[in-house]
Amino acid sequence: MKVLMINGSPRVHGNTYIALHEMEKVFTNSGIETEILHVGNKDIRGCIACTSCAKTGKCVFDDIVNETAPKFEECNGLVIGSPVYYASANATLIAFLTRLFYSTHFDKAMKVGAAVAAARRGGLSSTFDELNKFFTISGMPVASGQYWNSIHGREAGEASQDIEGLQSMRTLANNMTFLMKSIALGKKTFGLPEKEPFQRTNFIR
Ligand SMILES: Cc1cc2nc3c(=O)[nH]c(=O)nc-3n(C[C@H](O)[C@H](O)[C@H](O)COP(=O)(O)O)c2cc1C
């Protein structure tokens, strides 16, 4: 069982990392393999709507997005962490996620998702909502915790003083572990839910 953890901060060991690392310790104690992938410090461009991925199943820009795709396909859970920038996720992270989710065609259903936001003061829950949208359009159950998964701090390292924030991360990781294990058991017992052929109507036809 494996969890892929995406760090959307340009600060590799900043407050987002502290939140992810707190979760990572819980996963490790539960025997779950983890990998933290730093994307916020990379030069990642946005989607250009060329739609070539519809034919190839990969992004036309052959960078960290295509490198991450097989790791995403393999994992049982995906954690996305972001610093809050103007009450939103870091733009580099969104460019990465947009291209990753859009270009890959493997079934993401029942991979468990969890979103985490780090900020000085405000915009945490709008960022949390923004990140969760990637899961909920993909048939991915969302793990929840004891709050809207957030941690506070401004300078890198300050989040380690946010006792409640750290506890939220541990609770989230424990809940996510339970959910992933339950889904693995459910898949064996019942199989995945059947899917209807997709009806894409664009509202007008
Ligand atoms: C461009 C920019 C915009 C920011 N916008 C917000 C904001 O809207 N709300 C907030 O509370 N903090 C804001 N911050 C502060 C960061 O969210 C905060 O420092 C956070 O801990 C950074 O996480 P990191 O250490 O993982 O990079 C902003 C920081 C930067 C650089």
Image (spheres, rainbow, N blue to C red):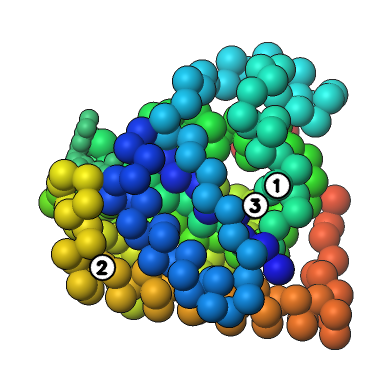
Pointers 1 and 2 in contact (C-beta within 8 Å) = no
* 65, above or below 14, in the image: above
Q: Nearer the viewer, residue 187 or 40?
A: 40
Could you tell me which quadrant the N terminus lies in?
A: bottom right
Q: Nearer the viewer, residue 111 or 12?
A: 12
Q: Quadrant of ligand 1?
A: top left
* 47, above or below 195, in the image: above
**Residue at (46%, 70%) from the top-left corner?**
25
Could you tell me how far apart the alpha carbons at marks 2 and 3 are, in whole angstroms? 27 Å
Mark 1 = which residue? 71
Mark 2 = which residue? 165
Q: Position of residue 86 (x, y in %)?
A: 22, 35
Which comes before the other along the chain, label 2 or label 3? 3
Q: Nearer the viewer, residue 164 or 108?
A: 164
Judge from the rendering whether residue 154 lies leftward or rightward of residue 94; answer left or right: left
Judge from the rendering whether residue 17 lies leftward or rightward of residue 160; answer left or right: right
Give me the disc on residue 108: none
Q: Secondary structure at mark 1?
A: helix
Q: Amino acid at mark 3?
A: Ser
Q: Amino acid at mark 1?
A: Lys
Q: Residues within 10 Å of mark 3 (few under 14, many from 20)?
A: some
Closer to viewer: mark 3 or mark 1: 1
Q: Secondary structure at mark 3?
A: loop
Q: Residues within 10 Å of mark 2 (few under 14, many from 20)?
A: many
**Residue at (17%, 54%) from the top-left corner?**
158
Give me the disc on residue 138: 3
Q: Secondary structure at mark 2?
A: helix
Q: Amino acid at mark 2?
A: Gly
Which comes before the other along the chain, label 1 or label 2? 1
Q: Position of residue 89 (x, y in %)?
A: 35, 40
